[in-house]
């Protein structure tokens, strides 16, 4: 198991994710009430899309969108392999598959990767990979099709 390794994004970087054939740029804005706020932009146009919020404390890791009114994902910490009682998403069975995985994404290798499996009520399965002090690296379908992938991150 692993205790409270920081799965949130490192505030010293700008993140670029490929999703739906577009690049989305994540820029740190502020920390408020223990949560980190990141503005998300369409990198091609520079248009603001929304603000994402990430929070990790001694009891849970959570991620959501500002104004949503709940979390898209909230899993208890410390992270341990096996089924978890995720508060959100309420319609999913969440299992931690690995707490010390290894993954190479776009030519960069990461160790101590947290691997999470969500099986939604719709029967869609999503596998997500998180790296310590980096945050989300990759989300795929069960058959490996990329949904969201960290294309790069640049130090500010």
Image (cartoon, helix red, strand yellow):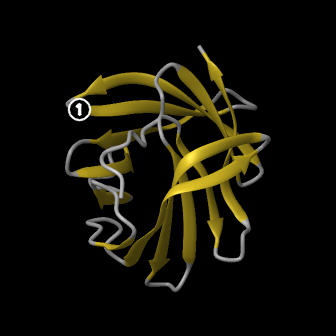
Q: Indicate left or right for 5 with 116 as reference.
A: left
Foreground of the two, 20 or 118: 118
Q: Is residue 71 above or below residue 39?
A: below
Provide the secondary structure element on which disc 1 rests: loop
Q: Is residue 100 above or below residue 9?
A: below
Foreground of the two, 98 or 152: 98
Q: Indicate left or right for 35 with 143 as reference.
A: left
| The C terminus: image quadrant | top right
Foreground of the two, 107 or 43: 107
- At horizontal 31% and vertical 60% (from top left) the residue drawn is 75
Q: Residues within 10 Å of mark 1 (few under 14, many from 20)?
A: few
- On the image, numbered disc 1 is attached to which residue? 34
The count of marks equals 1
Question: Seen from this angle, which residue lies furthest top?
Answer: 156
List x then y, in percent, for residue 38: 45, 31
List x then y, in percent, for residue 72: 38, 58
Q: Is residue 11 above or below residue 76?
A: above
Q: Indicate left or right for 128 with 7 as reference.
A: right
| The N terminus: image quadrant | bottom left
List x then y, in percent, for residue 111: 59, 46
Q: Is residue 109 above or below residue 43?
A: below
- At horizontal 59% and vertical 25% (from top left) the residue drawn is 14
Quarter location, residue 107: top right
Q: Indicate left or right for 102 with 143 as reference.
A: left
List x then y, in percent, for residue 6: 39, 39
- At horizontal 50% and vertical 84% (from top left) the residue drawn is 122
- At horizontal 71% and vertical 55% (from top left) the residue drawn is 20
């Amino acid at each position: 198991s692993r205790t409270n390794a920081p799965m949130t994004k490192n505030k010293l970087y700008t993140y670029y994710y490929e999703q739906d054939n577009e690049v989305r740029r994540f820029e740190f804005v502020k920390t408020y009430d223990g949560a980190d706020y990141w503005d998300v932009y369409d990198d091609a146009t520079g248009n603001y899309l929304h603000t994402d919020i990430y929070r990790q404390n001694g009891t849970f890791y959570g991620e959501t969108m500002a104004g949503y009114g709940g979390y898209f994902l909230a899993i208890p910490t410390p992270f341990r392999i096996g089924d978890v009682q995720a508060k959100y998403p309420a319609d999913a069975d969440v299992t931690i598959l690995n707490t010390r995985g290894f993954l190479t994404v776009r030519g960069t290798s990461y160790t101590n990767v947290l691997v999470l499996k969500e099986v939604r009520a719709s029967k869609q399965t999503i596998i997500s990979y998180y790296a310590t002090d980096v945050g989300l690296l990759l989300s795929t379908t069960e058959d490996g099709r990329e949904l969201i992938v960290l294309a790069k991150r640049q130090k500010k």
